[in-house]
Image (spheres, rainbow, N blue to C red):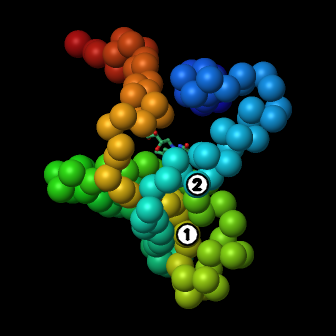
Amino acid sequence: MERFTAVRTERMRLLGLDPADPASGKVFMDMSARLFGAPVLAVICTDKALSSYLDIGLLVQTICLAAQHFGVDSIIASQLVSQPDILRPALEITENLNIVTGIGLGYAKPNSLINTYRSTRRPIEEVVRYKD
Ligand SMILES: Cc1cc2nc3c(=O)[nH]c(=O)nc-3n(C[C@H](O)[C@H](O)[C@H](O)COP(=O)(O)O)c2cc1C
């Protein structure tokens, strides 16, 4: 949550929005819900009879990497599938499938401010432990 808040704050500031202002928060939420204009949405589902979220994670990342190979950028966004009651009938997603996440895809505008944002990374020592 700390990282989520930090990244949100940094992105909002970059766009000239005040993270503490509810009206600015709504503007940002709207931009984010529209995935900053990505024109294509891939909805990733998994059969309810299968339980491996590891497999689906691999697939999601592979889609993003393959897209990038073809010059298409992506954003993994659960927000896009946060309303399954609307999504399911609209896309005819059957009940045997769980909706896992969405991936927004599109050609990034290089001069768009939001696309200049780079999140920081936690130090490697914080996330990796070496044992002799
Ligand atoms: C499973 C998952 C769900 C995510 N959902 C959202 C989302 O709903 N909205 C959003 O703006 N970013 C979301 N993100 C984060 C973006 O995809 C993020 O920009 C991307 O993971 C690149 O991360 P980076 O900032 O570490 O480079 C999600 C990431 C993951 C892995």
**Which residue type carries mark 2?**
Arg
Q: Quadrant of the C terminus?
A: top left
Label 2: element kind:
loop
Visible in this render: residue 86?
Answer: yes
Tag 2 or tag 1, which sits nearer the N-term?
Answer: 2
Q: Quadrant of residue 59?
A: bottom left
Mark identifier at residue 34: 2
Visible in this render: residue 61?
Answer: no
* Residue 4 percent across, percent down from the top left: 60, 30
Q: Quadrant of the N terminus?
A: top right
Kindly identify the residue that appears in the image at 29 percent across and 59 percent down. Answer: 63
* Residue 74 percent across, percent down from the top left: 37, 51
Q: Judge left or right: residue 65 versus residue 90.
A: left
Q: Nearer the viewer, residue 121 or 103?
A: 103
Mark 1 burial class by Cα count in 10 Å: few <14, some 14-19, many 20+: many
Mark 1 lies on residue: 99
